[in-house]
Structures are given as C-alpha cells and as structure tokens.
Image (cartoon, rainbow, N blue to C red):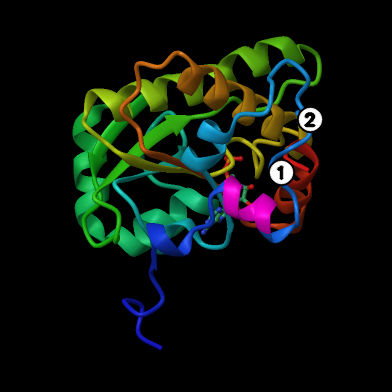
Amino acid sequence: MSSAAATQSLADIPTLTQVYRSAGRRQAASSTGDFPPSAAINARVGLVNGDITKLCVDALVNAANTSLSGGGGVDGAMHRAAGPGLLAECRLLRGCPTGEARITRGYRLPAKHVIHTAGPIYDHIDPQRSERLLRSCYEKSLELADACGVKSLAFSSISTGVYGYPSMDAAKVACETVRKYLDRGSSALERVVFVTFEQKGVAAYAEMLP
Ligand code: ADP
C-alpha cells in the first residue's frame, strides 16, 4: 500500500458521537465529573488510535522538546514523514519553552501544519507543576491553532512517552482542557482529535470517555 493510500481523512476519524453510537449509547456518562455531557462537544471531538502522521487534518500537535531539534517518539515520526524542510523551519524558531507552542508548515505530511509544543518531563515530587505545564501545552496549542485559522487539529498524547507523564492523568488534563476551551464558545475549531498510539493511551481515553 502506498503511504498516500494509508492516510486518514477527517471523515475516517470517528467523532465521540460516533464512538458512543457504535457502543450503543447516546453520550458519555459525564465521567470527568465537572462537565455535563454535551452532544455539541461530542460532535466536535474525535478519537482515533494509530499513527498521527497519517492524518489529513489542518494541523497536528507534536510532542516536541524545547530545542525543536527533532527527537524520538512521535517527534521523530513527524520529522521522518515531513522531510528535512520541517527541521529547517524549526531551527529558525530558536526553541520553544516548556508549556508553550510554535507552528510550522507540514511539508510532506498530509497535514498542512505542525504545532510543536514542549511538554513537561513528569515530576513525581511536584506533580502539580507538571499538570500546570501540560495544561498550558494544550491551551497554547488550541489558541495558536485558532489564531492561524486551523479548523481541524489532532493532538498526540503529550508527555506520555519518554517524558513519563502517567497516561490516565494526562488524558484527564487533555480532555478537561479541550472541553473548557471549546465551552468558552469563541473557538472556530470544527474538530479536535485525540490520537492514541500505545495500548496505555487507548486504555486511558477509554477510561476518561467511557
Ligand atoms: P514525550 O517526550 O512528550 O513523552 P513521546 O513521543 O515519547 O513524547 O510520546 C508521546 C506520545 O506519543 C506517547 O503516548 C506515544 O505512544 C505516542 N506516539 C509515539 N509515536 C506516535 C505516532 N507515530 N503517532 C501517534 N502517537 C505516537
């Protein structure tokens, strides 16, 4: 199969409405507690398991490092798929502090843009600080996406790989931050997709959005 044939369009990515429908339910049972179930939000949020580099969306959110010089994990996968133009543009940005976000073009990726955010290395001594920084990664990425006219945005599971953030806690931060942001009502984002990759991520989102 060619890599072009392996790309996934937005129409192939199930929204939460479709996820719940296929599970025989109308919506989530408000698992995160603070948020009532919302049909409108369920239609704007997607969930998919697989390789984020294959997604045909306006922008992908990369779990980058502060130097923006490429690395392993999802960052390495994005740079390999995008080709050398991505690293060349990243170098011009002169880094990205933890909790902030920067945008580049997507080069050979099917996505038009990449938003690079530097997640926190999980701190077991000060988990609140890690949480603040992770929340900031999601918020800043969402704000930057809106500022750049992005309509469809796919998040990798920031900090949950080599940076060691527990997947369940990270999924809660991701879901809450996106929900709060969309609830403000000022965003033009039409679709926000959570992308899981390893089984621990699948399990975390299944728990968060049962
Ligand atoms: P971090 O350094 O922020 O922890 P990693 O790249 O090590 O970043 O991991 C972040 C998450 O990205 C992990 O949950 C990992 O399973 C996931 N991941 C790795 N490769 C891919 C990929 N190609 N597509 C989507 N997610 C991926």
Name the image quarter holding the C terminus. top right
Magenta stretch: residue 59 in it? Answer: no
- Mark 2 lies on a secondary structure that is loop
Q: Nearer the viewer, residue 33 or 164?
A: 33
Q: Secondary structure at mark 1?
A: helix
- Amino acid residing under circle 1: Tyr
* Residue that carries the numbered disc 2 in the rendered image: 31
List x then y, in percent, for residue 32. Answer: 75, 25
47 in relation to 168, above or below: below
Residue at (47% x, 39% y) in the render: 44
Residue 98 placed where, x, y %?
A: 48, 21
Query: Which quarter of the figure has residue 204?
Result: top right
* Most frequent secondary structure within the magenta stretch: helix
Residue 23 lies, with reference to residue 27, above or below; the image says: below
Residue ID for mark 1 = 205
Q: Is residue 188 visible?
A: yes
Which of the numbered marks, if any, corresponds to residue 92? none
Which range of residues does the magenta coloring cover? Answer: 16-21
Give me the residue at 64% from left, 54% from top: 19
Mark 2 Cα-neighbour bin, 10 Å: few <14, some 14–19, many ≥20: some
